[in-house]
Amino acid sequence: MRVWSDRKKKVREPLFRGYVFVRIDLAERLSVLQTVGVVKLVTAGKRISAIPDEQIDWIRAVVDLKVPVERDTYPNVGQKVQVIGGPLTGLNGTVSTIKSRTRIVVGIETISQAFSVEIRPDFLKLV
């Protein structure tokens, strides 16, 4: 939900602004970098960073749920949990509460981004 001074409107936005996820061989990186709009590949030092397949699967699972998802700040502190019930079983994240609703914040460490989704507290276990 976007709020302007004169109205509110539901809008679709990318989960992670400014990022496009690609699976490429390193030999293909030049062709990706020559794509209009691409600025750089995510790196750690001089090495190209890869997001683990498991984290990409988490993103897909949440998007496929077709439930409201919010971008969130990447958590520095918070309780680490694992989802033990429902369609997100196996997902790891950090618990956050917003207006007394339990949400799980899932961090994509490689790009220091996160998203959160509402979840039943009984679907979580401490890790």
Image (tube, rainbow, N blue to C red):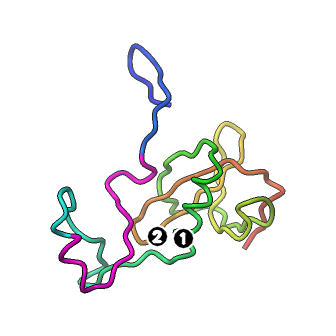
Q: Looking at the image, which is closer to me, 35 or 120? A: 35
Q: Residue 30's x, y, as percent? A: 18, 77
**Element class at badge 1:** helix
Residue drawn at x 47%, y 53% as measured from the top left: 73
For badge 1, the amino acid type reads: Gln
> Within the image, what quadrant is residue 16 found in?
bottom left
> Within the image, what quadrant is residue 111 found in?
bottom left
Residue drawn at x 70%, y 62% as measured from the top left: 88
In the image, which residues are magenta?
A: 14-32
Q: Residue 121's x, y, as percent? A: 79, 53
Residue drawn at x 72%, y 51% as measured from the top left: 119
**Mark 1 and mark 2: span between their CA atoms?**
9 Å
**Element class at badge 2:** helix
Residue drawn at x 26%, y 71% as measured from the top left: 41
Question: Which quadrant would the C terminus be assigned to in this image?
Answer: bottom right
Please state if 71 lies on the left or on the right of 93 as rendered. Answer: left
Which numbered disc, 1 or 2, marks the residue that appears first in the sequence? 1
Please state if 86 lies on the left or on the right of 47 as rendered. Answer: right
